[in-house]
Amino acid sequence: MAGIRDLQNPKDQKRNRALILLLSPAMLWLAAFMFLPLLIMLYYSFGTMTGVSMSLTTKLTLGNYIRLTQSPLYSKVLYNSVELAVVVVFLCLLLGYPTAYWLSKRSETTKFAFLCLMLVPFWTSVLLRTYAWILMLQDRGAVNFFLQALGIIESPLSMLWSKGAIAVACTQIYLPFMVIPLFGVLEMLDRKLIEAAKNLGASKLRAFWEVTLPLSMPGLVVGTLFVFVPTVGEYLVPSMIGGPNFESAASVVESNFGLTFNWPLGAALAVIVIAIICIAVFGLLKLAPPWKLIQREQ
């Protein structure tokens, strides 16, 4: 290894040292404010709360994880969060891929205009947007009003406090996180490859299936991660729109920390959620590594 290092260009060595120096503050920040809290939470997950004052004991135990695996309540909560994330990812893909594909073929002015319009919702907080969905989906809301005005329904539909309402609201919130990575990849595609496939006799559908879709997989993976990861841990939208009939993992973690003061059990549930997210992240990154885009450009 030393011999290989000696053969490197001095300019490359200097550039690598400068890069490490530039990255050091960010890495220290992550270690201090991300990994250290996670380690503390992992330590809490093996503890127990005892006494009237509910003090944390130093005796480590697997009891919290055993309780989570044996209780159908916590299994249902985890299932709700993962199911919601999968549904929202599917809806974002269903709406986001055609949008990104159409946008990648437009003129620069149209691209800029639509991207700006897509970022407009970020000017409003998620809390206000969630309240807006409550006003639209309630029995006397805008959706029921227009459906009744058009004669489609006779009586108001009960849309609020349901999984469907949560999925729709989350899709509206996270849709830009799917469209933007897909748009970035689709815009970089070499159109000559698609034309070559058509010249060899492939139909538009087959050219899309065998050329466009495989080449856009890195963007699809990044968009899926950007939607799946925050949706699994989503707290605000399920709490406000789901009502008491829907419990997410985030709401149960919050209740264990804020209401019952059972910090070890809440920490154990949070660790399991993080483990599910890590499995999904590593699985998707192995399926289509986004860094292949950099290699392709080089």
Image (tube, rainbow, N blue to C red):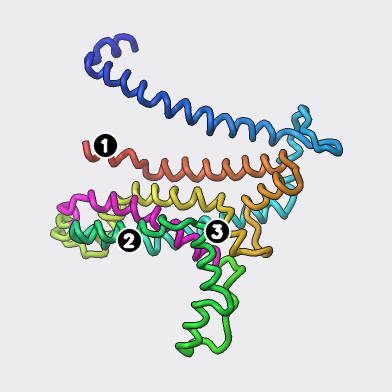
Q: Position of residue 146 (x, y in %)?
A: 47, 82
Q: Is label 2 in a helix, a strand or a loop?
A: helix
Q: Residue furthest right?
A: 52
Amino acid at dot 2: Leu
Q: Residue at x 15, y 55 (%)?
A: 196
Which disc number belongs to residue 84?
Answer: 3
Provide the residue designation for mark 2.
117
Task: Estimate the spatial distance between the alpha carbons at disc 1 and disc 2, rounded to whole Å.
Answer: 32 Å
Image quarter (top left, top right, bottom left or bottom right) of the N terminus: top left
User: Are there few (<14), some (14-19), or many (20+) residues within 10 Å of tag 3?
Assistant: many
- Nearer to us of marks 2 and 3 is 2
- Secondary structure beneath label 3: helix
**Helix, strand or loop status at disc 1:** helix
Q: Nearer the viewer, mark 1 or mark 3?
A: 3
Q: Which residue is mark 1?
A: 295
Q: Which residues are magenta?
A: 165-194
Of 31 and 85, which appears nearest the observer? 31
Is residue 216 one of those drawn in magenta?
Answer: no
